[in-house]
Image (spheres, rainbow, N blue to C red):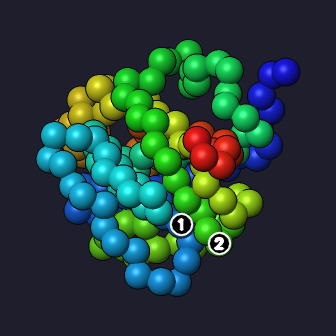
């Protein structure tokens, strides 16, 4: 039986200090995941931090909730993902929030049933964004300009979640 996509949402992120993150949406203190300078992400069971190739124009993240492990590799806009990580994620409160270290948190971005999940984290178009960002700045294109707005979300991250069976 093929896996079914149950819900999805895509949003632009706000970055701070060269990263953005998402977290188990709870009021308690969340310990920061261990940071590796060589990696494009850091993760703990309740928080994931992503270091995009460019922080401006803003990257996007798409959350997807599946009933089982998706059978097909994610392709976005004809592109294969450039980076990928399979992680475990715990959503104890049933929702996921976004955060940027300097800009604060945005709770309740994506609703999921409380529980443990497999998380397939994928990144797209990271390799093209530094040159695109440099081109925009060289031509004095700034936020608010239609060309800048079209560039936002080009660098995309996909967080695919599906339930982790007990004992897995």
Please give the residue where the numbered disc 1 appears in the rendered image. 24
Residue depicted at 31% across the width and 60% down the height: 33
Residue depicted at 37% across the width and 24% down the height: 82
Query: What x and y, as percent, mark residue 156?
Result: 47, 38
Query: Is residue 143 found left or right of 28 in the rendered image?
Result: left
Callout 1: SS:
strand
Residue depicted at 31% across the width and 67% down the height: 32
- In the rendered view, tell whether residue 26 sits above or below residue 67: below
Q: Residue furthest right?
A: 1
* Residue 64 showing in the rendered view: no
Crowd class of label 2 (few under 14; some 14 to 19; many from 20; radius 10 Å) = some
- In the rendered view, tell whether residue 31 sits above or below residue 110: below
Crowd class of label 1 (few under 14; some 14 to 19; many from 20; radius 10 Å) = many
* Residue 2 showing in the rendered view: yes
Report if the CB atoms under discs 2 and 1 are less than 8 Å apart: yes
Foreground residue among 13 and 114: 114
Query: What x and y, as percent, mark residue 98?
Result: 49, 64
Residue depicted at 38% across the width and 57% down the height: 44
Foreground residue among 31 and 121: 31
Query: Is residue 74 found left or right of 154 in the rendered image?
Result: right
Mark drawn on residue 85: none
Q: Residue furthest front?
A: 167
Query: What x and y, as percent, mark residue 119?
Result: 54, 43
- Quadrant showing the C terminus: top right
Query: Is residue 116 found left or right of 35 in the rendered image?
Result: right
Callout 2: SS:
loop
Query: What x and y, as percent, mark residue 55?
Result: 30, 50
Please give the residue where the numbered disc 2 appears in the rendered image. 93
The numbered mark, 2 or 1, whose residue comes first in the sequence reads 1
């Amino acid at each position: 039986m093929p896996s079914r996509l149950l819900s999805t949402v895509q949003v632009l992120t706000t970055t701070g200090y060269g990263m953005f993150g998402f977290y188990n949406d709870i009021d308690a203190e969340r310990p920061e995941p261990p940071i590796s300078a060589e990696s494009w992400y850091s993760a703990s069971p309740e928080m994931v931090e992503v270091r995009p190739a460019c922080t401006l124009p803003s990257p996007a993240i798409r959350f997807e909730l599946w009933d089982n492990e998706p059978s097909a590799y994610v392709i976005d806009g004809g592109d294969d993902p450039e980076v990928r990580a399979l992680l475990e994620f715990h959503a104890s409160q049933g929702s996921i929030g976004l955060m940027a270290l300097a800009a604060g948190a945005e709770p309740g971005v994506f609703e999921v049933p409380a529980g443990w999940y497999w998380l397939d984290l994928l990144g797209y178009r990271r390799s093209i964004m530094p040159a695109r960002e440099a081109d925009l700045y060289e031509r004095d294109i700034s936020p608010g300009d239609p060309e800048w707005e079209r560039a936002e979300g080009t660098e995309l991250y996909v967080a695919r979640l599906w339930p982790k069976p007990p004992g897995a």
